Structure formats: C-alpha cells, structure tokens
C-alpha cells in the first residue's frame, strides 16, 4: 500500500521558495488550485499502483514541476504573436495588416492615460468622438467629411441604414459578393433595412439596366468592388463615371464599397505594379461618388476599421444614426488609425509595413533569403533559395502576384508536414507554407528584425 504521508500539505508546499515565486506571478488562488490538482493526481497514481513508492523529496519535485506547467498552460494568452513567412501580405487568419512602429507607439501613449476622446479642448465642453481622424481622411481622400466604425461590413450596413432604410438600393447582380467568414452583401443589406434590387446579369450589367430600374422607391445606387474574385471573358460593368452621371440625372446618390482602402503607390518609379486594377479612394471621390466605404486594416495598412467618406450632408446623417453608437471605435483604434494616416499624408508610406512589403524588390528579398539559408544550413537544415511568388491577400487584388525568392527547407527524417508542424510549435510560432511537397519561407512578409529568430530555428 502506498504511503501518502510522503506528500506535504498544500500550505507546506506554498512556503517553498519556488512556489512563492509562482504565487507572486500567478496569484495565491491559482497556485493553490494547481497544487491541489497536482497533489490529487499524484495520490491517484500512487493509489492505482502506476507510480512506484516515492520519497518526500520526489513527491515535492513532482508536484512543483506539475504545478508550474499547469499554471503556465492555464495563464498562457490565446492571442499571441507569430512570424508570417507565408508571403501573404494581408493574411486575414494572421490578423491582416501589422501596424507601424509609430502606430504601436501612439496606442501605447494613448492607452496608459486619459484622452480627449469626447472632450472639446477648445471649448472645455463635451465633444464628439467622430471628429477624430476626419481631418486626415478628408485630406487624403478629397471627401467633404468622414466617419470611422469597426469594420467595412459595418460601414456598409450603417451607410445603407442611414440613407436607404425601407427603400430600394440598386446593385449589379455580378457584385453580390460574399466576403470572408461567410458574410454576404445581400445579408448585410437586409440587416440595414434596405431593399435589395438586383440589376443586370452575373457577367454583364449595362448602365441602361440601372436606368430602367430607377423609380421613386430608389434611395441609392451601390457599386461594390469585387475585391476577392475576378470575372473574366464576356463581361461588362458600368464605370463609376457613368453611374455618377446617371445618379445626377435622376437625383439618386451613388455609393461605392471599395473594400481595401487603397491610397495609391508612393512616388517611386522602381516599384512593381500589382494593383493596377485596384480602385484608389481619392479617384472615386474625384469621379463624383457621394459616399465611399473601405477598410482600415487592408491596403491602408492600419487597424481594423471601416471608413465612410463623402459628401458632408450624407456623412452627417450617418453620424446621427443610432447604429453609429453600436458600431463606433475606441480610442486605441483612433490612435493607430491617425498614426497610419499621418504616414500616408506626409509621404512616409513605406513606414507602414503593408506598403513596405508591397514595395520590396526581388533583389532585396533575395539577399535576406541567401543569408537565412546559409544560417539554417549551419544548424542542420537543407536550405536553398528558389524563385517564387507572394500574394497580397485579404480579398485585395485577386490574382495579383509579386515575384519573390523563397527559402526551401528540408530536414533529414522529417516530412514537409512534420517540418511545418515543428515551425508552428516554435516560440514564437512560424507560419510557413507547403509548396510542391516542400516547406518554403517567404521573407517578404517577415519583419526584418525577425530574420535572426528564423536563423536559429
């Protein structure tokens, strides 16, 4: 029969130096729970004969190790940083756009104190939350006003709820897209209270189709950029200019859901041009769209947000709508968004990681890849550098590819799946991709300071 007297009491265990250190880090209640659980587990093992007789010292070591492991596992955050070596720049599953250092610093500065989120410093009275970031958004887009909500689906729903509740919204049948997570444009429109009126066909919609559908029930014409798919072949789609002209003729506003929030390339002649078909926000405003909506965390390169920009009167109606309170953003989102917009406004767009990654040349990536491959080879890996392509992702520029250089990895005794799993289990996790039965790393999406971490895999 096992002798349970070798197991100290919970209080005796708590007084040990190692446990006091754990208690300081995790708290008394969590430590006691862990010690009780490990003590009970050891008693069960001893009682069942699964563990040979132990000394008091062995029992203490077993319980302390188990308690430390249990506490680390129970308190480990579910959200953690990873290294994106997939080559997908706006990776939805990995949090889309990484923030710039300036945006992260702005968040830290704002988060640790009070702010003027809803306080008018000039008047000394209550202010409006939706005033923040508007001066930068109007400068960058050319719009008369702008508001910010928590994502672009919310922006579209709020826009429709404020301007078309109970009335018809005309949209081309070929633009009734489904975005990530199963959210469909018709469903978003239905929740807004607007009545969907499809015009044209899946592959061909003419301006005459819109003209024929306009009636006294028409509140809005909605144009949706097909940012996550492409229809090719026998196709036709009215230009924004044609829709604006039609809207002016019948006094019907034109709204455009742009999706990605592309502000255009920095002024560098040597950059690749994978986004030739991606609409630029300011171009849509200049073409006469009454309202445009777009994301903050895609090609704009900022935090998750949905932005509506356009004519001041329409924006004012949207800002007054009751849904605005439910969909508004907090001070941290405004902080990150303003810092990101500043980089665009002052001509430092390449400080925004997404813009920098888009602009990396094959030569720049290749030099880093060669250095990484040499380091990995010294650590027992079979690593070689090959040609490949990166993608933009995030529902932006479907089919667009960027040439890159990839580090192809092999390890004796390990399959590609096993290597990929090993990388995912590292600290920090490394997310790679398997191509032609080989694991490859694309440094386009790896932050430069993370190269040293990869070199020590």
Image: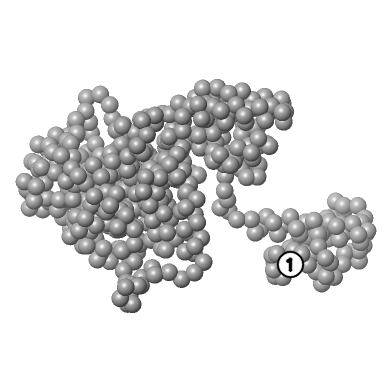
Residue 90 vs residue 57, the one in the foreground? 90
Q: Residues within 10 Å of mark 1 (few under 14, many from 20)?
A: some
The residue that label 1 is drawn on is 23
Rendered position, 296 above or below 204: below
Badge 1 marks a residue whose secondary structure is: helix
Residue 118 vs residue 56, the one in the foreground? 118
Residue 192: horizontal and vertical position, in percent?
A: 26, 56
Rendered position, 104 above or below 434: below
Q: Which of the 4 image quarters holds residue 206?
A: top left
Residue 48: horizontal and vertical position, in percent?
A: 84, 55
Residue 82: horizontal and vertical position, in percent?
A: 57, 44
Residue under the point 29% across and 49% down: 140
User: Can you say which quadrant of the picture contains the C terminus?
Assistant: top right
Residue under the point 19% across and 47% down: 289
Q: Which of the 4 image quarters holds residue 397?
A: top left
Q: Which of the 4 image quarters holds residue 411?
A: top right
Looking at the image, residue 238 sits to the left or right of residue 386; the answer is left
Count of all numbered marks drawn on residues in the image = 1
Residue 1: horizontal and vertical position, in percent?
A: 93, 59
Can residue 207 be seen?
Answer: yes
Residue under the point 66% across and 58% down: 74
Looking at the image, residue 85 sits to the left or right of residue 133; the answer is right
Residue under the point 6% across and 48% down: 250
Rendered position, 244 above or below 390: below
Can residue 10 be seen?
Answer: no
How is the rendered protein coloured? one colour
Residue 51 vs residue 386, the one in the foreground? 386
Residue ranking furthest to the bottom: 124
């Amino acid at each position: 029969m096992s002798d349970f007297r070798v197991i100290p009491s919970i209080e005796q265990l708590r007084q040990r130096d190692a446990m006091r250190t754990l208690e300081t880090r995790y708290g008394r209640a969590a430590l006691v729970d862990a010690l009780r659980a490990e003590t009970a587990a050891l008693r069960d093992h001893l009682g069942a004969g699964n563990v040979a007789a132990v000394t008091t010292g062995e029992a203490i070591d077993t319980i302390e190790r188990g308690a430390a492991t249990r506490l680390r596992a129970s308190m480990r955050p579910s959200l953690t940083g990873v290294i994106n070596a997939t080559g997908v720049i706006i990776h939805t599953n990995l949090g889309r756009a990484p923030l710039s250092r300036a945006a992260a610093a702005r968040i830290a500065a704002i988060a640790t104190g009070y702010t003027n989120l809803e306080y008018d410093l000039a008047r000394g009275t209550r202010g409006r939350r939706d005033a923040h970031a508007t001066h930068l958004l109007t400068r960058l887009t050319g719009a008369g006003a702008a508001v910010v909500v928590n994502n672009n689906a919310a922006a579209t729903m709020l826009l429709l709820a404020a301007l078309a509740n109970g009335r018809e919204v005309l949209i081309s049948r070929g633009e009734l897209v489904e975005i990530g997570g199963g959210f469909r444009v018709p469903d978003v429109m239905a929740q807004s209270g607007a009545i969907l009126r499809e015009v044209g066909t899946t592959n061909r919609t003419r301006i005459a189709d819109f003209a024929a559908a306009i009636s006294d029930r028409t509140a809005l014409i909605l144009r949706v950029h097909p940012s996550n798919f492409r229809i090719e072949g026998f196709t036709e789609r009215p230009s924004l200019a044609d829709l604006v002209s039609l809207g002016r003729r019948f006094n019907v506003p034109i709204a455009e859901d742009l999706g990605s929030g592309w502000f255009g390339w920095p002024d560098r002649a040597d950059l690749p041009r994978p986004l030739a078909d991606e609409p630029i926000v300011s171009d849509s405003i200049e073409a006469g769209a009454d309202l445009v909506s777009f994301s903050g965390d895609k090609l704009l390169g900022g935090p998750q947000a949905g932005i509506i920009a356009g004519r001041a009167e329409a924006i004012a109606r949207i800002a007054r709508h009751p849904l605005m309170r439910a969909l508004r953003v907090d001070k941290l989102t405004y902080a990150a968004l303003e810092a990101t917009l500043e980089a665009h406004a002052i001509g430092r767009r390449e400080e925004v990681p997404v813009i920098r990654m888009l602009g990396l040349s094959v030569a720049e990536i290749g030099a880093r890849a060669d250095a990484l491959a040499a380091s990995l080879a010294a650590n027992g890996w079979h690593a070689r550098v090959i040609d490949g392509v990166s993608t933009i992702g995030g529902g932006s520029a479907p089919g667009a590819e960027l040439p890159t250089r990839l580090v192809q990895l092999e390890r004796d005794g390990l399959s590609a799946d096993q290597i990929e799993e090993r990388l995912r289990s590292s600290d920090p996790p490394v997310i790679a991709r398997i191509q032609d039965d080989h694991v490859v790393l694309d440094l386009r999406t790896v932050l430069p300071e993370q190269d040293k971490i990869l070199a020590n895999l």
